Image (cartoon, coloured by chain):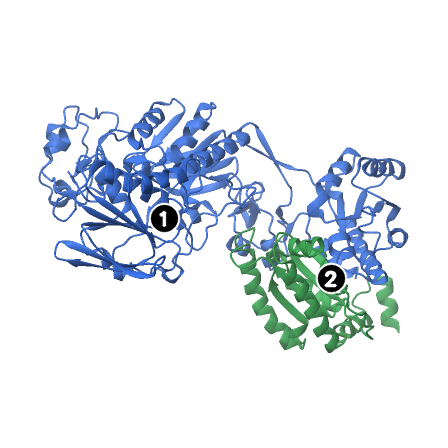
Amino acid sequence: MHTDKVKHDFEPKIVALVCTWCTYAGADLAGTSRMQYPPNVRVVKFPCTGRIDPVFILRAFQKGADGVLVSGCHPGDCHYMAGNFHARRRFAAFRKLLEFVGVDLSRLQFSWVSAAEGGKWVEMVTELTERVRQLGPLTEFRELELAEQWSGATLTTPELKEAYQAI
Amino acid sequence: MSRIGVFVCHCGENISRTVDVEKVAAEAGRLFGVAYTCDYKYMCSDPGQNLLKKAVAEHKLEGIVVAACSPRMHEKTFRNAAKAAGVNPFLCEMANIREHCSWVHEDRDEATAKAIDIVTMMVERVKRNKKLQPITVPVTKKALIIGGGIAGIQSALDIADSGHQVVLVEREPSIGGHMAQLSETFPTLDCSQCIMTPKMVDVVNHPNITLHTYAEIEAVEGYIGNFQVKVRKKARSVDMAKCTGCGVCMAKCPQKKIPNSFDKNLGFRPAIYVPFPQAVPNTPVIDRENCTWFKTGKCGVCQKVCGPGAVDYTQEDEIVVEQVGAVVVATGFQLYDIGPKPAGSAIEGYGEFGYGTIPDVIDGLTFERLASASGPTGGKIVRPSDGAEPKSVVFVQCVGSRAREKGISYCSKICCMYTAKHTMLYKHKVHDGQAYVFFMDARTPGKGYDEFWRRSIEEEEAVYIRGMVSRLYQKGDKVVVMGSDVHIGVQVEIEADLVVLATAVQPREGADTLAQKLGISYDKYHFYSEAHAKLRPVECATAGIYLAGACQGPKDIPDTVSQASAAAAKVMTLFARNELEREPIVAKVNERFCVGCLACRKVCPYGAVEEKEIRDRSGNLIKVVAYVNPGVCGGCGTCQATCPSKSVELDGYTDEQIMAMIEAL
C-alpha cells in the first residue's frame, strides 16, 4: 500500500470511542496485519459501547473533534451480553437530537467492528476521515464554547466573578 | 497525584522505525505532572522492566504510562512490574503506539504526532486513575450439573471423585439420556447399556453426588463461586424414601397403552412407570396426564397394591435451593422432528418425505430402539407398520443437516458413523437383507472410524449411493425412494421395506430458556456458545459456567466424554482455591446523589443492581438507592451511561478519566 502522499490543507481530527473486546481488538488486528490508514484517528477505549455516554460525543465535538466514530461488537456478540443493544437505542435517539442541534450527521459514524475485522476498521476510518475532510472543520461547537467562557460561567472563584461583573 | 513516569518502547524497530521515540519521550516530559521519561529498546524485557522499577524508586513515581504495544498484549506484564515496584497496578496504563500507530502509518512526522497525542491522553487518564484493590470472592465448593446424560454423568463422577460435592439435575424420571437409548456404539459395537448402566449406578451410589431426577432448573442467581439455584422437583407421586422398586404398581396399573417415548413410541407403558428397566433411580413416576386417578378421581390401584405405601397422590412440586460454586451445562440434543413442521419454526419441514405420515419411515433413534436387545421388539428388526422383517432398508443421510435451504447449515457429525453402524446391525440380524445408503459425503474423522465405515461396505455389503433423495411415497406395502446417483448420473428408484432418516442433531427443546436463566449465550440454532472456539472450548463467556456434550454442538460419545471431563477439570481448578480474585472494574453507586430510579437495574445484563434502603438511626426510611453487588457486576458500565443523575461510576472508566482523555486532544 504505497500510495503517493497527498498533502491536504485540512487534516480532520477524528475521535473513536470503541469497546475493548471487539473494535479495539479489531484495530489491533489491523496493526498486526500492517494495514495502512490515515493517522487522524485517536482511540478512546471503553469496556463496552454501553458505557459510552452521548455526552462524550458532544464533548469531543466541542473540544476539537471534526468527526466521531463509535464502534463496538456486532449485535448478539457483546461480551456483556446486551451492552451494545442499549448503546444502539441510546444513539438512535441521540442522532435525532444532534441533527436538531445542527450537526451534520455524516460527521458521526456508528458501526460494528468485530475482533476479526481489521479490514473493516481500516475501511471505516479511511472513509470517515475522507468524508469529514470534505465537510471541513466543525467550528460551531467550539464557538459556542468560547461564548460560554465569555459569559463568565466558568469563572470559579468569587473574586474573578466579581471582576467579571465589574467590566 | 502528579508524579508520572512515561516509558517509551522502541519494540526493536517496530515502533522506532516510524515513530520518533526520543521526541515522544521529550514531549511527554513537558506534560504537567510527568516527572520522568525515558525510551528503551525493549520495555517488556527483563532489563526493561527493571528500568521501570528502578525509575519508580529513584523518582518516587506514583503513576506509570508505558508507550508500547496494545494493552491486550502486555498490560498484565507492566501492571505486575508496577505492583512489584510498589505502585498500585491500576495506576499503570499502556499507550498503544504500535498496533494503533507505528504499524499502521508510514509518515514519520504524522505517526510521531499521533504517538504524542496517544501518550498525552494516557497521561491525563493516569492522573485521574484511582488505586483499586482486586476483589476477592469466596468459592462454594459444590458443583451443579444440568443434564444426566453421558456428559453430565461423566462430569459429575469426575468432580465427585475429586472429593467435591455435586448436584445432578435431570429433567426425565431417570438419568441416562440418549446413550441409554442406543443399542450399540460405533466404532467398537459395544453394547451401549452395558457400558452406560454401571456409570448410572455409580452416580446414584456416590456419597458426593446428590441426584434430583424428574426435576428442572427454576432460577439461577449469583455469580462464579456463589450461585443460588432453585430446582423444581416435579411431583413424582411416589415417595422415593419408601419405594423399594418392586414394580408391582406398574404390573397392576390398568392403563397399559400409553406410548413409551423412551422407545420412540414403538412400545407401551403403564401410567405409573419407569422409562426403562435399568432406570436410575428405579423409582416409578405417575404420569398425571394419563393416570385414571388424576383424570377421574377413581382407580387408586397402585396405592392399594403398594406394600410399603409409597404411592402418594397428594404430592406436590417441591422447590429445592442449592448453593453451588460452578455450573456444568450438559443438556444434550434432540433429533430434528420429521413430522409436520411446528408452527413458528424457522426450519422448513420435509413434506417430500411424508411429514411423518408413512409409518415405515423412521429416524435413526427409532432404529436404535428396534435394534436394542432391551427395546420394544427385543432386538428384532421389524417394520413398525406390520411387524414384518424388512428385506431392504434404505438409509438417507443429511436429513436436515447441511441443508441451508431447509434452515440448518451445519453438519450433525454423528450420522455418517451411526448409519454405517445401522447397516451392520441390520446385516447381523437380517442376513439376507440389503441396506442402501444415500449420502452426500462420508465424514469419518476419528480413531478407527474410517475403518469401521469401510467395513460396512466391504464386509457387510451395504450399497452406498452418492446422491440425495427427492421423494418418498407409499406404494402398496413398500416405500418408494426416489433419488439420484450423481456418480453415474442416473435417477434411482428403490422399493424399500423400511426407510431410516438420519435426521439432524438439534439442541434440546427449551435450550434457549435455560440459557436465559443462566445468562449464557447461544447461537441461532440455540447451541450454547463457548467463550472461545479454539482456546476456551468448554467455558461459557459467563464465568463459572461450563459446557459439556451436544448442547454446545453435535458430538459423538468420545468427544462428549472428553469435553465432560474437561469441564470437570475446569470446575476442579476453580475449586482448588478458597477465594477468587477478580479485576476491580466494577460500578459503584454514589448514594448521596442516587435518586433511586433504578434505571440502572433495567439495563444491567448481570442483575447486579439491588435496592438498598437508607435509614436514619431510629430506623426511619430516608430513601431507597441502588446498590451494585461487586461480585456480580461484570464491569460493562451500561448503568453509568444510563444513570440520569450521574451517580453510578465504573471504576477504571470514570467520566472524569474519559473526559480528560477527550479533552487532551
Q: Chain of mark 1?
A: B
- Say which of B622 and B40 sits in front: B40
Amino acid, disc 2? Gln
Amino acid, disc 1? Val
- Say which of B142 and B456 sits in front: B456
Asked whether residue B324 appears in the rendered view, the answer is yes
Residue B459 position by quadrant: top left
Relative vertical location of residue B330 with respect to residue A119 in this rendering, above or below:
above
Respond whether the residues carrying marks 2 and 1 are from the same subunit.
no
Q: Is residue B523 left or right of residue B335?
A: right
Residue annotated with mark 2: A36
Give the residue at x 16% y 54%: B478
- Residue A71, image x, y percentages: 63, 61
- Residue B81, image x, y percentages: 77, 36
Residue B228 position by quadrant: top left
Q: Secondary structure at mark 2?
A: loop
Quadrant containing the C terminus of chain B is bottom right
Residue A59 position by quadrant: bottom right
Q: Which mark is residue A23?
A: none
Q: Secondary structure at mark 1?
A: strand
Q: CA distance from mark 2 to mark 1?
A: 44 Å
Residue annotated with mark 1: B505
Chain B appears in which tint?
blue
